[in-house]
Image (spheres, grey):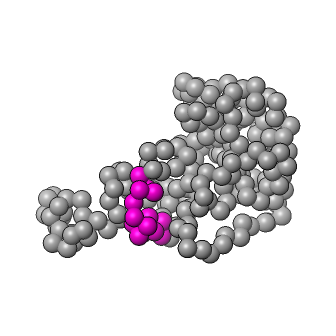
Amino acid sequence: MHPKVDSFIVDLTKWQKEVEKLREIILDCLLTEDFKWRTPCYSFNGKNILLIGCFKNYCSISFFKGVLLQDSKKILVSPGENSQSVKYLKFEKLEEIKALEETIRAYIIEAIELQKAGVLVEKTQSNNIEICEELALEFENNLAFKNAFYELTKGRQRGYALFFNSAKQPTTRTTRILKYQDKILKGFGIHDCTCGLSKKMPNCDGSHKTLG
């Protein structure tokens, strides 16, 4: 059990009992507990399997390779139309978790077995903008941020997506997303001028450096 997860649960003003129960089920499946992306994260042999999430109207378990699960009960939810890997289980009260305990356990065991077998998600090429899983998870955490992103032009969405996806490490992708979150919320593209001094509007030409 990770001390940061202990603190995370203690600080919860909502979903505390639900998260405690989910944690109990997950740890019983012998996953390793960590704290990443500001939330409890669970892995098997160093590979991420799932996250616990807490939102305004529900708490959840997000499977990194959720699309590969059979989902016999048809209860998995996709975080967005462009997500090709993550799917999650959502819960609105403790009783739901208790009623589905064996199903939750079965889904976790299946996810572990898929990881043991080395099964990978085959991502399809399409005209859709590829949203990395770190961005999809941030959308789950912040609906205003998600709406602001999709209000950008397709070109601006694609510019951000390509930049985020180009990072090899998940932590780097998350850092980039958080760094540019405010710019996205204000409706700017990744290369847009935000200071108003650029002579190549709307693109930034480095004129903001004169403000320092």
Image quadrant in which you'd find residue 203: bottom left
Residue 211 in the image, given as x and y percentages of width and height: 14, 59
Question: Residue at the spot x=67%, y=70% of the render?
Answer: 123
Q: Is residue 198 left or right of residue 25?
A: left
Q: Nearer the viewer, residue 26 or 199?
A: 199
Q: Nearer the viewer, residue 78 or 6?
A: 78
Q: Is residue 211 left or right of residue 140?
A: left
Secondary structure mostly taken by the magenta-highlighted segment of the chain: helix
Residue 109 in the image, given as x and y percentages of width and height: 84, 48
Query: Is 151 part of what is drawn in magenta?
Result: yes
Q: Is residue 45 visible?
A: yes
Q: Nearer the viewer, residue 126 or 198?
A: 126
Query: Is 157 part of what is drawn in magenta?
Result: yes
Q: Is residue 42 visible?
A: no
Q: Is residue 26 left or right of residue 128?
A: right
Q: How many marks?
A: 0
Quadrant placement of the N terminus: top right
Image quadrant in which you'd find residue 180: bottom left
Quadrant placement of the C terminus: bottom left
Residue 165 in the image, given as x and y percentages of width and height: 52, 67
Question: Residue at the spot x=63%, y=26% of the render?
Answer: 16
Instruction: Tell me the magenta residue range.
Output: 148-163
Residue 154 in the image, given as x and y percentages of width and height: 43, 67
